[in-house]
Each structure stands twice: as C-alpha cells, then as structure tokens.
Amino acid sequence: MAKQLDFYFDFSSPNAYMAWTQIPELIERTNCQVKYYPVLLGGIYKTLGIPVVPISQKTDYVPVDLARVSRELGVPFVMNSGFPVNSVALLRGALVTQEEGGFLEYTDAIYKAVWVDNKNMADSSVVSKVLSDAGIDAQKIMARIGEEAIKEKLKSNTQSIVDRGAFGLPTFFVGNEMFWGRDRMHHVEEELKY
C-alpha cells in the first residue's frame, strides 16, 4: 500500500517552492499519496513566539544560497523583490481550489508568479491576471477567499502543524515522522520507501 506524505507549505517560503518542484518526481519514485496543507508561516512563528528579526548577513546570504539550490535542482528561481511575500490571500485561494478542483494548477501558477516571474502578488489585479493567464477562474477564487470557513481552515491548518511539533517550512510528515526543510527530502524518500 502506498504511504501518505503530508506536505505543509506557504507561498512565502522560497524553500517550500523548491520542495514543491521536487514532489512530482518523488511521487513517481515512491508511489506515495500526497496531502497538501497550505499554512501561514507567520502564524507558526506567532504561535510559537519565534521572533522574526531580519539579520543583514542572512538577508544578504539567502538569495545567493537559493540561486545555488535552483542550479542544483535545475529549477528556475528569482528572489521576489517584495520578499517577505504576504501570502494570506494566496493560501486561502489554494484552500478554495482544494474544495473546488484545480489545486495543482493553481499552486503551480502562484509559485511561478512569486519565485520565477517576480510578480507583486500583494496586488489583487496581478493575482487575477496570473490566474486568468493560467486558465483559472480568478473571479470565482477571489470571491471566496474572504469566506469565514476558508479563513478558519487556514488557521486550523496552521495550528495543526504546530500541534504536530513543527516550527518552520517546508515540513513533511510520513506517518508520525517529521522532516523539516527542502534539504531533507532524501530522508523523506527513504521513509516513504521503508
């Protein structure tokens, strides 16, 4: 029987984007079933009391490191000029597509817009154009992102990852085994094959 992989992500995390690009091949190699959890990274930090204090050395280093990772993985990457990206509406849109269909297409389009095309995804007109260009009904998604049930689902997803002991993104679970970080995907694969 195929194992289930729980993948927790936020569009604001460039490392979650890198992990996202690797999941199709991981599925192919392991025949796993993936359950996707859009969560708010800032909500994790807030719940755990993790201060978000910019460190200039890290701020300078991260884009260099991510460029190396993109070359290693062979995936396109551009550091978003609006970083840190406000992803609340984008995550709510992902939850809408989980209910109505088109989740993978939506998530691909959003990740590409943020981490390849350097789009300002805080601008709803930009988001609408990105989705429309990808053949997604932007108006239908945008109409639902303010629904209380969608807002509560994002909060619930975010609390669920904290309750499972996680502290950052991307985070993966195979059963009760937690793996944190894009650079741990080889361990995820080992666990899925075990």
Image: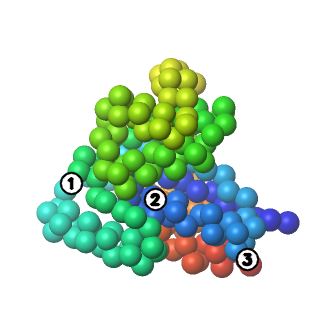
Badge 1 is on which residue?
53
| Mark 1 vs mark 3, CA separation in Å | 39 Å
Labels 1 and 3 touching (C-beta < 8 A): no
Q: Nearer the viewer, residue 110 or 94?
A: 110
Q: In this view, does 83 lie above or below 24?
A: above
Left or right: 121 in relation to 146: left
| Mark 3 vs mark 2, CA separation in Å | 22 Å
Badge 2 is on which residue?
16
For mark 1, give the secondary structure: loop
Q: Which of 133 and 48 is in front in this view?
A: 133
In this view, which residue lies farthest toward the right?
1
Q: Residue 30 carries which label?
A: none
- Quadrant in the rendering for residue 128: top left
Q: In the rendered image, which quarter contains the N terminus?
A: bottom right
Amino acid type, residue under disc 3 in the picture: Lys
Left or right: 114 in relation to 110: left
Classify 10 Å Cα crowding around label 1: few (below 14), some (14-19), many (20 and above): few
Decide which of tag 1 and tag 3 comes sooner along the chain.
1
Labels 3 and 2 touching (C-beta < 8 A): no
Badge 3 is on which residue?
193
Q: Residue at (26%, 66%) from the top-left corner?
A: 63
Q: In this view, does 122 lie above or below 162?
A: above
Q: Residue at (66%, 52%) from the top-left corner?
A: 35
Mark 2 or 1, closer to the camera: 2
Decide if residue 45 is in sight here.
no
User: Looking at the picture, how far across and down is residue 141, in whole percent?
Assistant: 53, 28
User: Looking at the picture, how far across and down is residue 80, in whole percent?
Assistant: 28, 53
Mark 1 or 3, closer to the camera: 3
| Mark 2 vs mark 1, CA separation in Å | 20 Å
Amino acid type, residue under disc 1 in the picture: Val
